[in-house]
Image (tube, helix red, strand yellow):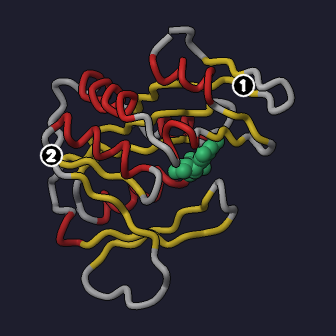
């Protein structure tokens, strides 16, 4: 079992509504050794790929993506969530449905930081229904840049995001794929044991 799966088993908390809380090591307090391993593991899984930039979405993707960017030696760009005021200038926008907050958010990046032809590795903490990743893919395509791959820390395969993304033909690597989780028993099962 890899380090992330071990940590999910020991410290993850399953909540109602198919939500896994990883606040003690990934989403609030951050286990830096684990973060380092995550960066190195994505570097290994995308070895041989040309990657010019790492793209994620604020807020919880940023720490993960920074570790990945450090391992690839490339810049990290994060999509911002628009507050709806004073968002001016040349930007790419997309809409994302928030799984955790149950609302639509507009996200954007400055056109200045995402250029035509760039090879982008998209990274995020969770993959549930796929809206966050689809929004990020949309920003990349508006810039005429290219999605080199998608790296997810925790995919919940009982939700349909992974299927949607794989059907579109992207190389998707998830470090932990949760097949089922139960908020009453706190039992979590992964799709592959290793
Ligand atoms: P999706 O857009 O794929 O439906 O959901 C992915 C986004 O929702 C991620 O950026 C993540 O922040 C959040 N998310 C989805 N599922 C979970 C979960 O089980 N736990 C936590 N903490 N965040 C989640």
Q: Residues within 10 Å of mark 1 (few under 14, many from 20)?
A: some
| Residue 56 position in % (x across, y down) | 37, 52
Residue 130 seen in this snapshot:
no
| Residue 184 position in % (x across, y down) | 86, 29
Q: In the displayed orientation, state which residue is furthest to the right.
A: 184
Question: In the image, is residue 163 above or below residue 23?
Answer: above
Q: Nearer the viewer, residue 138 or 158?
A: 158
Query: Looking at the image, how many numbered discs can be counted on the residues?
Result: 2
How much space separates mark 2 and mark 1, taking CA atoms?
35 Å
Identify the residue under disc 2: 74
Image position of 72 (left or right of 179):
left
Q: Residue at x 62, y 21 (%)?
A: 9
Q: Secondary structure at mark 2?
A: loop
Q: Secondary structure at mark 1?
A: strand
Image position of 149 (left or right of 20):
left
Q: Residues within 10 Å of mark 2 (few under 14, many from 20)?
A: some
Q: Earlier in the sequence, mark 2 or mark 1?
A: 2
| Residue 149 position in % (x across, y down) | 32, 38
Identify the residue under disc 1: 180
The quadrant where residue 57 appears: bottom left
Determine contact: label 2, label 1, CB under 8 Å: no
Residue 180 seen in this snapshot:
yes
């Amino acid at each position: 079992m890899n380090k992330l799966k071990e940590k999910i088993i020991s410290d993850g908390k399953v909540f109602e509504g198919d939500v896994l809380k990883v606040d003690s090591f990934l989403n609030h307090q951050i286990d830096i050794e684990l973060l380092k391993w995550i960066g190195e593991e994505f570097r290994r899984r995308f070895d041989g790929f040309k990657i010019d930039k790492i793209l994620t979405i604020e807020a919880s993707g940023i720490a993960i993506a920074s570790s990945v960017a450090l391992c690839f030696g490339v810049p990290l760009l994060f999509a911002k969530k628009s507050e709806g005021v004073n968002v001016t200038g040349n930007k790419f926008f997309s809409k994302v449905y928030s799984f955790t907050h149950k609302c639509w958010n507009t996200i954007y990046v400055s056109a200045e930081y995402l250029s035509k032809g760039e090879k982008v590795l998209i990274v995020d903490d969770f993959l549930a229904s796929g809206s966050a990743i689809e929004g990020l893919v949309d920003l990349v395509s508006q810039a005429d840049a290219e999605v080199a791959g998608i790296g997810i820390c925790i995919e919940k395969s009982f939700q349909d995001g992974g299927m949607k993304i794989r059907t579109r033909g992207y190389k998707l690597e998830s470090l932990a794929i949760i097949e089922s989780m139960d908020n009453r028993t706190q039992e979590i099962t992964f799709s592959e044991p290793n």
